[in-house]
Amino acid sequence: MHSTHTAYRLGSSIGLIGGAVFVWVNQAALTAAASWSAILAWAALLALAIWNVWIRPKPLNNLRAPRPRAGLIYGLACLGMVLLIVLGSRVLTSSRHEAATPALVALAVGLHFLPFSHAFNAPFFLRLGGAMAVLGAIGLILALAVGAPWGAGFAVLAGLAMTALVAFGARWNQGQLTRRGETPDPGTAPPS
């Protein structure tokens, strides 16, 4: 049980750091009001996440072991993410669409989480990856069509979504937000 909580807290902490990076790196491209709103929302979600994950954690129920090839899937997903960011950024830069890069990064990070759901028996990653990928894709499309600040704005939203999902994922994991008959979500046990 102790190692499960340690892995869960490590994975959650990595998610919180990722959310912070998306918000803090990209908020400067927004208007002052939007920037401050994002920072305040992030701070509130961070406080909730710290409370749910570190201060008042509840037992993690119904956790299942990762699949045998989870490490390989994890490695390939990370490699795919890096390749998409590097190659996609080059294409955006060469086509003078640098403003879309933050959204591309959110899309790539979101997509890299999707295989984790199967590999680690953790449906949480479908919610996390899906939310980030959708927000990244919308931001990418808007940034390509309209320009700044859409790429950065949707990257900030992706960071807020990541932080919120870690914060509320802790409650899902503890069985408090599950529907009747649903098992609690295993959460963010493996680091991402």
Image (cartoon, rainbow, N blue to C red):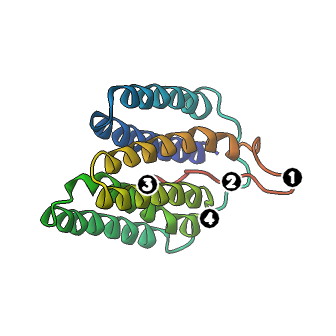
Question: What residue would you read off at disc 3?
Answer: 192
Q: Position of residue 20 (x, y in %)?
A: 38, 37
Single out the mark in the foreground, 4 or 1. 1
Residue reaching furthest to the front: 146
| Cβ atoms under marks 2 and 3 closer than 8 Å | no
Residue 185, which numbered label?
2
Q: What's under tag 3, amino acid-wise?
A: Ser
Residue 121, which numbered label?
4
Residue 44, which numbered label?
none
Neighbor class of circle 3 (other Cα within 10 Å; few <14, some 14-19, many 20+) is many
Question: What residue would you read off at disc 1?
Answer: 180
| Cβ atoms under marks 2 and 1 closer than 8 Å | no
Question: In terms of sequence position, does the residue under pointer 3 or pointer 4 come before the other?
Answer: 4
Q: Is residue 82 left or right of residue 10?
A: left
Q: What's under tag 2, amino acid-wise?
A: Asp
| Residue 1 in sight from this viewpoint | yes
Image vertical order of residue 69 relative to residue 37, above or below: below
Q: Position of residue 149 (x, y in %)?
A: 30, 45
The quadrant of the rendering that contains the N terminus is: top right
| Cβ atoms under marks 2 and 4 closer than 8 Å | no
